[in-house]
Image: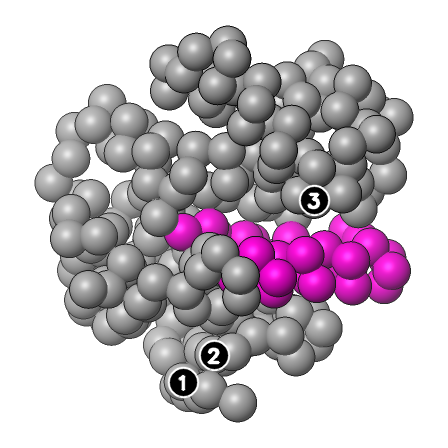
Amino acid sequence: MDIIKTTGLTKIYSNNGLEVNAVNQVDLNIQKGEFTAIVGPSGSGKTTLLNMIGGLDDITSGTVEIAGTNIDLLSENELIDFRLKNIGFVFQAYNLIPVLTAKENVEFIMLLQGLSEEERKQRSEELLNQVGLTDKINSRPNQLSGGQQQRVAVARALASKPSFILADEPTANLDSHSTSTLLDMMAEMNEKEKVTFLFSTHDQRVIDKAKRIITIEDGKIIKDERP
């Protein structure tokens, strides 16, 4: 079964009375274990598409199904709960909580899920070890490099055991060494543990790692390749 399925997915913004089709009739299927990059020029609709798949942006028309659930039919509270259990997010700006340590940032989503203190401690330490940050578990974001913060963000995204991870320009603020480390780590998770990743990106280094490349222009998919 597809983890992600969109049908006729459309987002129209109104700009000074003009209607802009940010995403236009997109049909997309993503299966478990895929490592997919959505690419295209700025303003092509990549981030809007990702945001609708993640339930962060309202849908004008069409449907998004996550593991068989049409998320547009969920109430606001149901959608929040559904995202919490099913979707991991990695953003360009890291979005870590400044006053929390790396470990506490990773634990936070599990706290919202109601996991016990012991479960949270064990899983957060496992994940931070997995992303190579065992020695940084008690460091706050301002004590970490950009690459380290983004690795904490990946660990946090994995903490809820989501169906898949949406990564919006995750390497945009990173130097080449940090980008390489992060991508190698995500590719290994994809290979060994079948974690499903869907990226939006301009970064050729991400595109080179992807197993499937979807090109979007003017809100439409114009190419879907498996290199």
Which residue carries the number 1 mark? Answer: 224
The reply, left or right, for residue 11 in relation to residue 67 is: right
Disc 3 crowd rating (10 Å Cα; few below 14, some 14-19, many 20+) is many
* Rendered position, 71 above or below 141: below
Residue kind at label 1, given as amino acid type: Asp
Which residue carries the number 2 mark? Answer: 212
Whether residue 102 appears in this view of the structure is: yes
Which residue carries the number 3 mark? Answer: 131
Q: Nearer the viewer, residue 27 or 20?
A: 27
The reply, left or right, for residue 44 in relation to residue 2 is: right
The reply, left or right, for residue 183 in relation to residue 3 is: right
* Rendered position, 2 above or below 92: below
Residue kind at label 2, given as amino acid type: Arg
Discs 2, 3 touching: Cβ within 8 Å: no
Discs 1, 2 touching: Cβ within 8 Å: yes
Residue at 59 percent across and 27 percent down: it is 124
The kind of secondary structure element at disc 3 is loop
Residue at 43 percent across and 33 percent down: it is 160
- Whole-angstrom CA distance, mark 2 to mark 3, is 24 Å
Q: What's drawn in magenta, residue-wise? A: 164-190
Question: Residue 187: x percent and y percent?
Answer: 61, 64
Whether residue 200 appears in this view of the structure is: no
Q: Nearer the viewer, mark 3 or mark 1?
A: 3
Residue at 61 percent across and 43 percent down: it is 154
The kind of secondary structure element at disc 2 is strand
- Whole-angstrom CA distance, mark 3 to mark 1, is 30 Å
Indicate the quadrant containing the N terminus: top left, top right, bottom left or bottom right.
bottom left
First-in-chain label (3 vs 1): 3
Q: Quadrant of residue 73?
A: top left
Residue kind at label 3, given as amino acid type: Val
Residue 186 inside the magenta-drawn segment: yes
